[in-house]
Image (tube, helix red, strand yellow):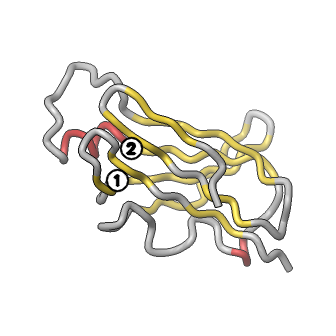
Amino acid sequence: MAKGFLTTHVLDTARGIPAAGLAIDLFRIKGESRRHIRSLTTNADGRTDSQILPADEFDTGTYELLFHAGDYLTASGTPPEDPRFLDIIPIRFGISDMDSHYHVPLLLSPFGYSTYRGS
């Protein structure tokens, strides 16, 4: 059985706070097919209350996280644009080690973002 799992942490770097209330969708990618696994929302600390992909569902392969940044930015009072520069942010990544903790953080502002493989 796998010991690995997947987590995230979203920080609003423009405001210097965790991005609470940001919706996230996880998909499994196989070739051209894309299967929705789950939807979660960040808590007051900018994290999800549960692992995005817990050990009992963890598997190697390609995944995609969709961060619904536009809705979060609107709810947080960021002045609207039409269309908003950043709306849904996709991050596609691979999981190759069944026993590792994969952490995919998102550092977010209205006009830019960054990510990395965290710990």
Rendering coords of residue 33 (x, y %): 72, 40
Q: Residue at x 66, y 49 (%)?
A: 117
User: Where does label 2 land, which residue?
Assistant: 68
Mark 2 touches mark 1? (CB < 8 Å): yes
SS at badge 1: loop
**Horizontally, is 57 left or right of 60 in the view?**
left
Picture quarter with the N terminus: bottom right
Q: Is 102 situated above or below 105? A: below
The single residue placed furthest to the front in the displayed view is 16
**Horizontally, is 117 left or right of 26 in the view?**
right
User: Where does label 1 land, which residue?
Assistant: 22
- Front-lying residue, 84 or 16: 16
Rendering coords of residue 110 (x, y %): 30, 31
Q: Which mark is residue 81?
A: none
Picture quarter with the C terminus: bottom right
Which is nearer the N-term, disc 2 or disc 1?
1
The single residue placed furthest to the top in the displayed view is 82
**For residue 3, what is the image quadrant?**
bottom right
**Horizontally, is 39 left or right of 43 in the view?**
right
Amino acid at circle 1: Leu
